[in-house]
Image (cartoon, rainbow, N blue to C red):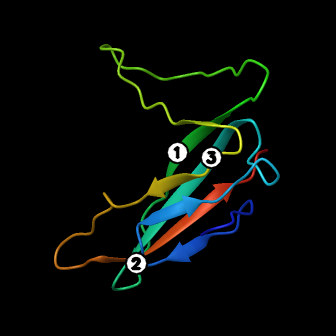
Amino acid sequence: MAVFQPNVPVTQADPLVKVEVSRTNPLPVGPNRFRLVVVDDQGNPSEPTFIEVIVLAPTDPTAVLDVVNDAGARIDPQVPFGTTFLLSGARSTDVEPGRVVEYQFTLVARS
């Protein structure tokens, strides 16, 4: 279980992290940005990658702005308010013979 605080990395060896929330301890409605940096066995960090998870409002409409390609394909991470979900860094890789040994997941504070 990981309780995310803005701008505080959750560091672990497992590429899958559970973002534990509830109706009494929710993420805010709207977009929530997460950052992932991976570290290889030589201690080299990757460039960060980001994903936005949209928390849907329990009663009001939720505006969503997507980027789509010519075929209309998009990534659409949406979760109901107060619902726990998983983030995965499992597709992260390193150049052989190196290997990823650490995953640093961070909830990025809203500005």
Viewer-proximal residue, 45 or 26?
26
At mark 2, the secondary structure is loop
Residue 42 is situated, as x and y percent measured from the top left of the image, at 34, 86
State the separation of the CA atoms marked 3 and 2: 23 Å
Q: Which of 5 and 79 is in front in this view?
A: 79
The picture places residue 53, in percent across and down from the top left corner, at: 58, 41
Nearer the observer, 60 or 95: 60
* 48 lies above or below 82: below
Residue at 61% x, 61% y is 106
Q: Which of marks 3 and 2 is nearer the N terminus?
A: 3
Q: Are marks 3 and 1 in contact (CB under 8 Å)?
A: yes
Q: In which quarter of the image is the C terminus?
A: top right
Up-down relation of residue 5 to residue 54 (above or below): below
Query: Seen in the image, is 52 located left or right of residue 29?
Result: left
Mark 1 lies on residue: 51
In the picture of the structure, the residue carrying the numbered disc 3 is: 33
**What distance separates the C-alpha of mark 3 from that of mark 1?**
6 Å
Pair 1/2: label in front? 1
Mark 3 / mark 1, whichever is N-terminal: 3
Find the residue positioned furthest to the bottom: 42
Query: Above or below — where is 70 with respect to 67?
Result: above
